Amino acid sequence: MSDLILYQRDYCHLCDQALAVLAEASAPDFDSVWVDDSALLAQRYGTRVPVLRDDRDGRELDWPFDATRVRAFIGALR
């Protein structure tokens, strides 16, 4: 299990873009969680997805983000 979680939805073009940005940023392994699988997550993240979360300290990076912002966010993990 990774410390990074990408909250996303099925058929979400912004989520597809976020995945491309994470690849561009050479992000380490992360878990994908689909918010529609949980009423609680849908309520919390439904209008915010995609959201990248550091599960260790609770920091979240809301969309829109680019590779530079992702690298800075990930840099704080090290």
Image (cartoon, rainbow, N blue to C red):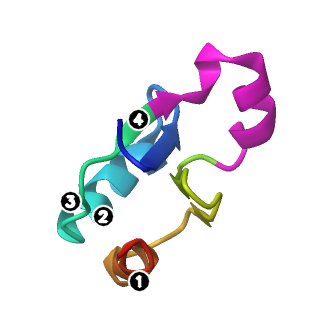
**Which amino acid is tagged 2?**
Val
Q: Is residue 43 magenta?
A: yes
Q: Are marks 3 and 4 in contact (CB under 8 Å)?
A: no
Going 41% across and 71% down the picture, which residue do you hit? 77
- Marks 3 and 4, how far apart at CA: 14 Å
Q: Are marks 3 and 2 in contact (CB under 8 Å)?
A: yes
| Vertical placement of residue 11 versus 45, above or below | above
- Marks 1 and 4, how far apart at CA: 20 Å
* Magenta residue span: 33-48
Mark 3 neighbour class, 10 Å CA radius: few under 14, some 14 to 19, many 20 or more: few
On residue 72, the disc is 1
Going 24% across and 71% down the picture, which residue do you hit? 25
Q: Position of residue 3 (x, y in %)?
A: 42, 50
Q: Position of residue 72 (x, y in %)?
A: 41, 83
* 36 lies left or right of 13: right
Quadrant location, the N terminus? top left
Q: Earlier in the sequence, mark 4 or mark 2?
A: 2
On residue 21, the disc is 2
* 60 lies left or right of 71: right
Mark 4 neighbour class, 10 Å CA radius: few under 14, some 14 to 19, many 20 or more: some
Q: Earlier in the sequence, mark 3 or mark 4?
A: 3
Q: Earlier in the sequence, mark 1 or mark 4?
A: 4
* 72 lies left or right of 40: left
Going 34% across and 78% down the picture, which residue do you hit? 71
Q: Which residue is mark 4?
A: 32
Q: Is residue 19 magenta?
A: no
Q: Nearer the viewer, residue 19 or 40?
A: 40
Nearer the camera: disc 2 or disc 1: 1
Q: Which residue is mark 3?
A: 23
**Which amino acid is tagged 4?**
Ser
Nearer the camera: disc 1 or disc 3: 1
On residue 28, the disc is none
